[in-house]
Amino acid sequence: MNENEISYIVRKCIFNVYNKLGPGLLEIVYQKILIYELEENGLDVKSELAIPISYDDKEFDLNFRIDILVEDKVILELKSVKSLEDIHFKQLNTYLKLSDKKLGLLINFNTTNILDGVKRVVNNI
């Protein structure tokens, strides 16, 4: 599957989780339930994946963690905040660059309309 095909399935899973749980819960709740939903839909999922920083041919593990990586292609960065800020987009963009992935979804579950809470972030597409 390519990134767009994965994204389609991921969005369906996000909507399912949101419609069943609604807004207002902690990020970790959405993360655990979304992982379950993604796996139930046949997707390979990794969570809390470390992203090392390379500098002068050395690698540093500085506790940067991808919330969810789907099919080793699409990064999901989950939030449960009042509103998404520029720093959230920059964070996901940095994760995409450091991991050499092309597509990320920034997801804010703390919204009255989940369609407004899912944003695509791309890297060199």
Image: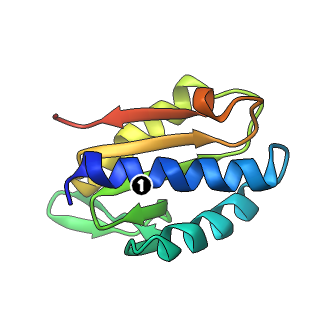
Left or right: residue 8 versus residue 68 is left
Q: Position of residue 121 (x, y in %)?
A: 37, 34
Q: How many marks?
A: 1
Give the labeled residue for mark 1.
9
Q: Amino acid at mark 1?
A: Ile
Q: Residue at x 52, y 75 (%)?
A: 40
Which residue is more in the foreground, 113 or 67?
Answer: 113
Q: Residue at x 53, y 24 (%)?
A: 86
Q: Is residue 33 visible?
A: yes
Q: Is residue 97 visible?
A: no
Q: Residues within 10 Å of mark 1 (few under 14, many from 20)?
A: some
Check the image and report above or below for 13 versus 52. Answer: above
Identify the image quadrant of the C terminus: top left
Which residue is more in the foreground, 56 or 93?
Answer: 93
Left or right: residue 99 versus residue 11 is left
Left or right: residue 65 versus residue 111 is left
Q: Quadrant of residue 88?
A: top right
Which residue is more in the foreground, 106 or 97?
Answer: 106
Identify the image quadrant of the N terminus: bottom left
Say how the picture is coloured.
rainbow
Q: Position of residue 50 (x, y in %)?
A: 42, 69
Q: Position of residue 19 (x, y in %)?
A: 73, 48
Q: Position of residue 13 (x, y in %)?
A: 54, 56
